[in-house]
Image: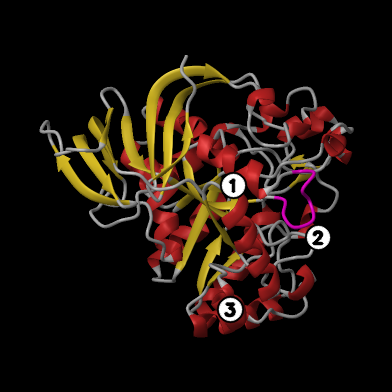
Amino acid sequence: MTQARDFAVLDATLVDPAAGREGRGSLLVRDGTIADIVWGAAPVPADGVETIDGRGLVLAPGLVDLRAFLGEPGAEFRETLGTGSHAAAAGGVTTVICRADTSPPIDDPAVIDFLKRRARDKAVVNVLPAACLTKGLHGKEITEFGMLLEAGAVAFSDGAAAVRNPQVMRRAMIYARDFDALVMNHVEDADLRGVGVMNEGEFASRKGLPGIPVEAETIMLERDLRLARATGARYHAEMISCSDSLDLIRRAKADGLAVTCGVSINNLTLNEIDVGEYRTFCKLSPPLRTEEERLAMVAAVAEGLIDVIVSDHDPQDVETKRQPFADAANGALGIETLLPAALRLFHAGQVGLPALLSALSARPARLLGLDAGRLERGQPADLMLLDPDAPFVVDKMTLKSRAKNSPFDQARLQGIVQATWVGGGLAYRAEAA
């Protein structure tokens, strides 16, 4: 990471998503932390430090991405901590929770130690590991939560695979409860998914593709929520995609369960029609649903029922995507386009900026107990400076990720990150036009 420096951003639109506050103001950074904030027109005192004109720009905490595949160890041909973190910084993301389904998987403290050392040497943003729920990702035996937490794990998940055995999941929740650890699960029943490759329905039938029913998600989710009720564990459904899942989450929260949920940026901004003529970049898990389901997800973000928006960054090798749709791998890039894609909801008047940024920063930080997502004195200066209205066309070849499988390729988006700081150090600055 780059060395911290002292600077002040003057006369910007400040957004504190944790407090739900938005307004004109200035902010001073000293020694890698937020030293002062002045809300209103008066500039913050900034003698002897670099000053940055924030007029027309938004200054907010950097994003916290709760789910991203960063390649290392074992899949460096898809992504590395270096390339993935540079893509994150370009998208205003200052903390990334990397998936545990690497090779070898993150089921041993030695792998966490390797990741921490590699991130220290190669990454320009904060990289924190999620550890495996089960040893070897086999879904049979839970990992040593205590040792993994001590080594630096921030949550537990088997990545792209759901824990299928309910007894194993129950044991994991009981064990996690004793450590106050967060259990996360990819809510998709593999048996119900079967050979399905996209959302089940009329569009899939017209394409001649086998469908994935919403019940593959809801049955797994309902099982997990019942286990969370029985054990008292903290549980997070990593990505939901349908209104039936929203109903289950709403009831669980109303009953006082310690449950939260996330949604992929893809399911917020794209629908099954975007598959078009068998576009494999839009082959995802969970699959893109109908427009009605997408709108239900958007409304749930605005309401606060959905807690977290994730990039679900999952870079794939070109050969795994250059296949017939049914044979192509799931996954797409997402971390660099997460913010501008999310800003579609803001520009459409569907979600206010503080609420949107809360789901992208403050809430995931709160779930993991991180010092992030807040504009407060004494907080680490993990910040992004954004021009929310600047238009651009996504060009997959200019994205900083090693892979190029973006579902937003050639999409017209608004919102360009001008600068990203991590601990007061400059991690990214946009090139001058």
Classify residue 203 by image quadrant: top right
Image side of residue 427 versus residue 408, left or right: left
Which residue is the site of mark 2? Answer: 191
Q: Along the line of sight, which residue is nearer the eye, 202 or 350? A: 350
The residue under label 1 is which amino acid type?
Ser
Name the amino acid, label 3. Met
230, above or below 381, in the image: below
Give the number of callouts: 3
Query: Which element carries disc 3, helix, strand or loop?
Result: helix
- The Cα–Cα distance between marks 2 and 1, rounded to whole angstroms, is 18 Å
Give the spatial CA distance, label 2 vs label 3.
22 Å
The label shown at residue 173 is 3
Q: Where residue 61 sits: x, y (%)? A: 36, 45
Q: Which callout, 1 or 3, points at the residue further toward the start of the chain?
A: 3
Specify start and end residues of the magenta stretch as a single range.
Answer: 71-78
Q: Residue at x 19, y 45 (%)?
A: 37
Residue 403 seen: yes
What secondary structure characterizes most of the magenta part? loop
* 101 to the left or right of 295: right
Say whether disc 2 or disc 3 marks the residue closer to the N-terminus: 3
Residue identifier under label 1: 241
Secondary structure of the residue carrying numbered label 2:
helix
Q: Residue at x 66, y 36 (%)?
A: 401
Q: In this view of the protein, which residue sits in the foreground, 220 or 23?
A: 23
- The amino acid type of the residue labelled 2 equals Asp
| Residue 214 percent location from the top left of the image | 67, 50
Residue 366: quadrant of the picture:
bottom left
Circle 3 packing at 10 Å, graded few (<14), some (14-19), many (20+), is: many
The answer to whether mark 2 and mark 1 are in CB contact below 8 A is no
Q: Is residue 431 above or below residue 180?
A: above
Q: Is 415 displayed left or right of 321 in the figure?
A: left
